[in-house]
Image (tube, helix red, strand yellow):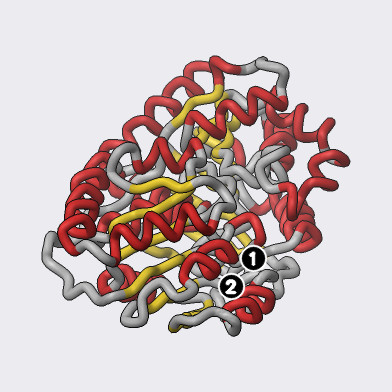
């Protein structure tokens, strides 16, 4: 099959949806399929390259930061893609796979109108009303008619969790349940080995209010003098978080935005990983942390619970005291900590890309049958 991937974010740009798009593309190429990716250009990156067999086209647009893109910047990508569609032979593609209902879903919808090509969408959370109100609430209200049109005309919508499927159904009055298919994200295995763990609690992700890092910082106050909290990532909330960290008794280090290799180094040496987010569609960083033997503590968010199951610890959303109790149990009891590190290593085996990619291929085959 020849597949066109549309996503305004692709490594080294963006958050969770970016590496997921890369992994899907890479695994499809490994199975003998052809994948073209249309994405944003960013300073210093080539406008075209072939990476592990993936053809990557980076179109001119406005983007100021690697880690995050605002709605205006996304809009410039959509416009640029529409104007450049004529460069690509759309009739040659078997599958149009777009990531995010809004904004890139609008491009896929136009491809269907102009070229008669059916499309599927991978929804990642921020493209669904109610998931990320601190960033896109107004835009979801204004773009609701377009959002509904894109969802209605999609052949299938893939979500990384049942939780996100349910949220989409809330926005569609229960319609389209049969074409919304939960398929979890995956991870590639690394050579099994023991890592020299240090007394480090790690967070990795964007620094937004919704991510809840402020509650983690408060929970760390006077937690344990020989432990360090390391925060990897960047975002508009960073200055606020750094200010509240100044009043906390404990070593807290802000690492900024890390490359994949540098982040892996952090996973390898940390002992505990915390995702204090109030809303997640999956939580890719959870399985990344599990892969390197971190005990996981996260919120009682439905998607996080789907991913972690009984292999981690949970606390009430926005409750620093509850989070603190979980952390104290881990840092004060080596055997307890070790047991959850082992559970994490066992749980992550269920998220294997080589098996998950076959579920995507089943969806693709169903799309071809509809053509």
Residue at 44 percent across and 51 percent down: it is 298
| Nearer-N-terminus badge (1/2) | 1
Q: Quadrant of residue 146?
A: top right
Q: Is residue 107 left or right of residue 253?
A: right
Residue nearer the viewer, 265 or 150:
265
Q: Is residue 173 left or right of residue 318?
A: right
Mark 1, residues whose alpha carbon is within 10 Å: few (<14), some, or many (≥20)? some
Q: Quadrant of residue 102?
A: top right
The residue to which callout 2 is attached is 234
Q: List x then y, in percent, for residue 354.
A: 26, 42
What kind of element bears circle 2? loop
Question: Which mark is on residue 349?
Answer: none
Point out the residue furthest to the right here.
142
Residue nearer the viewer, 155 or 215:
215
Q: List x then y, in percent, for residue 271.
A: 28, 67
Q: As displayed, is residue 258 above or below residue 149?
A: below
Q: As displayed, is residue 40 above or below residue 266?
A: above
Residue nearer the viewer, 233 or 352:
233
Q: As displayed, is residue 246 above or below residue 190?
A: below
Q: List x then y, in percent, for residue 99.
A: 58, 44
Q: Is residue 115 left or right of residue 9?
A: right
Q: Label 1 vs label 2: CA separation?
A: 9 Å
- For the residues labelled 1 and 2, say whether their Cβ atoms are less than 8 Å apart: yes
| Quadrant in which the N terminus appears | top left
Q: Nearer the viewer, mark 1 or mark 2?
A: 2
Is residue 31 visible in the rendered image? The answer is no
Residue at 37 percent across and 69 percent down: it is 201
The residue to which callout 1 is attached is 68
Q: List x then y, in percent, for residue 362.
A: 38, 25
Residue at 67 percent across and 15 percent down: it is 175
Is residue 72 visible in the rendered image? The answer is yes
| Quadrant in which the C terminus appears | top right
């Amino acid at each position: 099959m020849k597949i066109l991937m549309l996503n305004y974010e692709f490594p080294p740009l963006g958050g969770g949806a970016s590496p997921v798009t890369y992994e899907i593309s890479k695994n499809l190429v490994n199975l003998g399929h052809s994948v073209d990716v249309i994405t944003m250009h960013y300073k210093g990156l080539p406008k075209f390259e072939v990476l592990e067999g993936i053809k990557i086209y980076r179109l001119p647009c406005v983007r100021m930061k690697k880690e995050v893109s605002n709605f205006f910047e996304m809009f410039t990508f959509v416009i640029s893609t529409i104007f450049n569609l004529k460069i690509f032979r759309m009739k040659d593609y078997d599958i149009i796979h777009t990531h995010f209902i809004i904004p890139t879903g609008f491009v896929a919808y136009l491809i269907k109108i102009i070229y008669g090509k059916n499309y599927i969408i991978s929804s990642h959370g921020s493209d669904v009303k109610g998931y990320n109100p601190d960033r896109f609430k107004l835009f979801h209200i204004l773009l609701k008619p377009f959002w509904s049109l894109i969802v209605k005309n999609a052949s299938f919508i893939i979500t990384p969790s049942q939780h996100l499927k349910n949220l989409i159904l809330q926005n569609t009055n229960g319609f389209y349940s049969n074409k919304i298919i939960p398929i979890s994200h995956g991870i590639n295995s690394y050579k099994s080995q023991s890592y020299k763990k240090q007394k480090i609690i790690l967070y990795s992700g964007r620094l937004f209010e919704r991510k809840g890092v402020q509650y983690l910082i408060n929970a760390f106050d006077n937690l344990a003098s020989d432990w360090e909290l390391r925060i990897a990532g960047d975002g508009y909330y960073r200055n606020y978080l750094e200010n509240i960290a100044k009043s906390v008794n404990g070593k807290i280090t802000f690492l900024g935005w890390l490359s994949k290799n540098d982040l892996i180094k952090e996973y390898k040496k940390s002992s505990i990983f915390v995702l204090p987010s109030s809303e997640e569609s999956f939580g890719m960083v959870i399985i990344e942390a599990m892969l390197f033997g971190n005990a996981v503590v996260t919120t009682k968010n439905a998607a996080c619970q789907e991913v972690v199951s009984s292999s981690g610890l949970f606390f009430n959303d926005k409750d620093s005291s509850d989070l603190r109790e979980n952390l104290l149990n881990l840092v004060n009891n080596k055997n307890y900590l070790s047991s959850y590190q082992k559970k994490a290593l066992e749980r992550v085996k269920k998220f294997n890309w080589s098996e998950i990619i076959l579920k995507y291929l089943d969806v693709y085959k169903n799309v071809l049958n509809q053509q």
